[in-house]
Image (cartoon, helix red, strand yellow):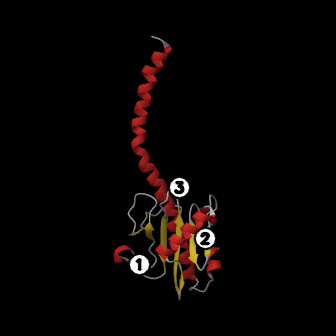
Amino acid sequence: MTPLKTILRVVLPLLLFVGCCIVPAMPEFFADQQRNKQQECRQVLSEVLARYLSLDGGVPLKELAAAVPGARRRPYTYVLGDGVTVPPLKDAPAEAERARQLAHVQQLAQPGLRGTQLTVACVGNTDDDEQLDVLSISSADRFGWGDSKVAAGEPYLHESDFNRDPGQVVRFEATDGG
């Protein structure tokens, strides 16, 4: 038997076996990556709202934007309202895409300060398709899709960049990372 035939006889079945084991797990791996990004967005939104509430609403939005943690600002733009945004640390979208994202988040989440009630949102395209992630959190009760009630302080998923139904209150398992 020639060395080439031996290699094909041994390596090819091994590659097929490995491929059959890995390929079915790939969609769940990518979904986990997306969920981790949404988890990060939810945490940052919660931190910004907690800071606002701890100061009894007596802080300008620009100062509140400074409270957005720098290490975890990927790949979302955080929108506080009145033109105050915090862009991603890297891979910021081009100007046209940024304008599309900001208009979209304004339409869905309506971020900003209304009296003493603050709604903060994040928007991002985590996989370079047309679909966006849009999450928000508010200091007041509000309504979501289908007039479902969203409690104050609950992150809400307006639109998802992967296969999760929009219009959900987003609850995540607690993590050690905060």
Where is 15 relative to 55, above or below? above
Residue that mark 2 sits on: 68
**Which residue was labeled with disc 1?**
151
Tell me the kind of residue under disc 2. Val
For label 2, the SS is: loop
Q: Which kind of residue does numbered mark 3 sit on?
A: Asp
Q: Nearer the viewer, residue 51 or 87?
A: 87
Coordinates of residue 59 in the picture (x, y in percent): 62, 83
Number of labels in the image equals 3
N-terminal-most mark, 3 or 1: 3
In terms of depth relative to the viewer, which is nearer, 104 or 135? 104
Residue shown at 45%/21% (left/top)? 8
Label 3: state its secondary structure.
Answer: loop
Mark closest to the chain's N terminus, 2 or 3: 2
The secondary element bearing badge 1 is classed as: loop
Which amino acid does the dot numbered 1 rest on? Ala
Residue 29 appears in view = yes
Q: Which residue is mark 3?
A: 128
